[in-house]
Image (spheres, rainbow, N blue to C red):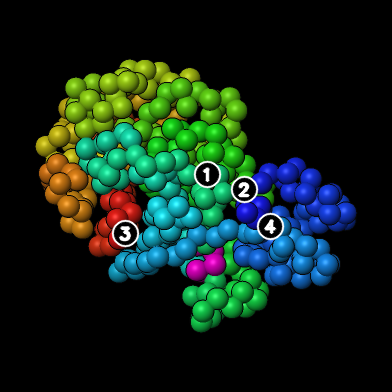
C-alpha cells in the first residue's frame, strides 16, 4: 500500500525524502504543493527533479476527497458532499462574504455524524460513525479551493495546471461548525488547526472552533492549542431547558460551562462567540434574554442569535418538531441584550433552501 503524504507530518515527510537522498529543500516544496497549490499528484510538482517525482509516485500518493454532490443556494452558499476513502461521507458549506466579492467562509466537519444528539440538529439524529483524521479535515479546505478555482476559470474536468495557476486562495475564514463536535476529536482537530496555520497560512484570527460545551476540551484547547477563536453553542439559559435540547448539559452543566468560559484565556480584543439558536416557545422569552445577560456578565463576548430553521429536507424521524420564533420575539430578545451593553447580532442562516443552514447537515448519501 502506498504512503499517503497527507497523513504525514512535516518531519515524517522529511524522513522519507532523506531516505531517497532528496535535497533538504524538497520537504518545503512538497508541503507547498500539497497544501498551498492543492496538488493531487507528485507529477504536478514541476520544480522537483523528475527522478524524485518518479520515485515518489512509485511509493506514495496524495489522497483527495471525492466530490459526490454540490448544491447551490439562491443566496450563493454552496454545500459539498464529500466521499471519504471508507465510503463514509461528510458535508462542508461554502458561504459567500456579504461585503467582499470572491471571499468566502468555509464551514468544515470534524466527525462523521455526532454523538451529542442535540434535539434541533440533524447531524445528531444520525448518530456517531467515526472521527475524521486531520488530513480529512484540511482536505475539505483544499478540495473546496479546487472547486472554486475550476468554477472561476470555467475549467472542464480536472485540468490541474489551469486550476493551480488561478488565484484560488479566496477562502478567508474557516469555522469548525459542520458535522460533529470538534472537541470530541481533540487531537486530530488540533493537528488540523496547526496545518491550516503553518502549511496553508491561515490567520489564527480567521479560524473558529465551535463547541457544544465539552469543558475538558475547552481547557485543553486553551493550554495546548493555537490561539484561534472560540464559539460556544449555548442555546439555553436554564439547566432544565438545556438538558432537554442539548443532552451534553447533563455531563457538563450550564453552570460548569459558564465557569469554563470565564476562565478561558482571551488575547486582547478577542471575545468568545456565544451561539444561541432561538426555538419558538422554548428559549426565546424575555425572561431568557434577561437570564442570558446575567449568565454572560463579565465575559468578553459576542452573541449570535440564530432563528431556528425548520429543516424541511430532513426526515421527521430524525428530529423532533420545533417552531421558528416570531420575528417580534427575536427583535425583543436582541433589544434586551443590546440595552445591557452586549453585542448581539441576528444571524441569517445561509443555505437553508439546500439544507446547509445551522443544524441541517446530515450527509445522507446512498
Separation of residues labelled 1 and 4 (CA atoms): 18 Å
Q: Position of residue 148 (x, y in %)?
A: 50, 69
Q: Main secondary structure of the magenta part?
A: helix
User: As displayed, is residue 7 above or below residue 168?
Assistant: above
Is the C-beta separation of discs 3 and 4 under 8 Å? no
Separation of residues labelled 2 and 4 (CA atoms): 11 Å
Residue at 62 percent across and 65 percent down: it is 40
**Does the magenta portion include 146?**
yes
Separation of residues labelled 3 and 2 (CA atoms): 25 Å
Separation of residues labelled 1 and 2 (CA atoms): 8 Å
Residue at 22 percent across and 37 percent down: it is 119
Please indicate, yes or no, whether residue 77 appears anywhere in the rendered image: yes
Is the C-beta separation of discs 3 and 2 under 8 Å? no
Q: Quadrant of the N terminus?
A: bottom right
Q: Position of residue 365 (x, y in %)?
A: 31, 59
Residue at 45 percent across and 33 percent down: it is 183
Amino acid at each position: 500500500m502506498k504512503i499517503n503524504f497527507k497523513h504525514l507530518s512535516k518531519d515524517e515527510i522529511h524522513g522519507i525524502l532523506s531516505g531517497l537522498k532528496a535535497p533538504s529543500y524538497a520537504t518545503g516544496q512538497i508541503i507547498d504543493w500539497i497544501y498551498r497549490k492543492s496538488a493531487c499528484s507528485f507529477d504536478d510538482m514541476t520544480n522537483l527533479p523528475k527522478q524524485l517525482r518518479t520515485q515518489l509516485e512509485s511509493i506514495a500518493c496524495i489522497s483527495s476527497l471525492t466530490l459526490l454532490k454540490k448544491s447551490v443556494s439562491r443566496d450563493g452558499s454552496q454545500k459539498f458532499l464529500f466521499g471519504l476513502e471508507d465510503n463514509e461521507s461528510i458535508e462542508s458549506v461554502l458561504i459567500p462574504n456579504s461585503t467582499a466579492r470572491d471571499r468566502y467562509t468555509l464551514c468544515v466537519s470534524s466527525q462523521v455524524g455526532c454523538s451529542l444528539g442535540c434535539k434541533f440538529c440533524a447531524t445528531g439524529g444520525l448518530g456517531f460513525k467515526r472521527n475524521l483524521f486531520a488530513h480529512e479535515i484540511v482536505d475539505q479546505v483544499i478540495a473546496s479551493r479546487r472547486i472554486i478555482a475550476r468554477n472561476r476559470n470555467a475549467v472542464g474536468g480536472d485540468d490541474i495546471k489551469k486550476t493551480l495557476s488561478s488565484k484560488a486562495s479566496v477562502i478567508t475564514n474557516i469555522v469548525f461548525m459542520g458535522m460533529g463536535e470538534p472537541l470530541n476529536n481533540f487531537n486530530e482537530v488540533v493537528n488540523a488547526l496547526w496545518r491550516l496555520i503553518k502549511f496553508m497560512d491561515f490567520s489564527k484570527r480567521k479560524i473558529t472552533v465551535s463547541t457544544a460545551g465539552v469543558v475538558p476540551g475547552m481547557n485543553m484547547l486553551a493550554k495546548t492549542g493555537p490561539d484561534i477563536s472560540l464559539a460556544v453553542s449555548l442555546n439555553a439559559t436554564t439547566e432544565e431547558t438545556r438538558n432537554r435540547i442539548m443532552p451534553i448539559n447533563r455531563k457538563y452543566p450550564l453552570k460548569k460551562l459558564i465557569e469554563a468560559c470565564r476562565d478561558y484565556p482571551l488575547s486582547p480584543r478577542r471575545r468568545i462567540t456565544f451561539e444561541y439558536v432561538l426555538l419558538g416557545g422554548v428559549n426565546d422569552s424575555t425572561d431568557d434574554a434577561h437570564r442570558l445577560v446575567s449568565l454572560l456578565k463579565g465575559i468578553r463576548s459576542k452573541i449570535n442569535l440564530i432563528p431556528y430553521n425548520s429543516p424541511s429536507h430532513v426526515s421527521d424521524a430524525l428530529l423532533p418538531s420545533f417552531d421558528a420564533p416570531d420575528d417580534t420575539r427575536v427583535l425583543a430578545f436582541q433589544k434586551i441584550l443590546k440595552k445591557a451593553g452586549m453585542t448581539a447580532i441576528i444571524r441569517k442562516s445561509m443555505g437553508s433552501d439546500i439544507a446547509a443552514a445551522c443544524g441541517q447537515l446530515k450527509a445522507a448519501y446512498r
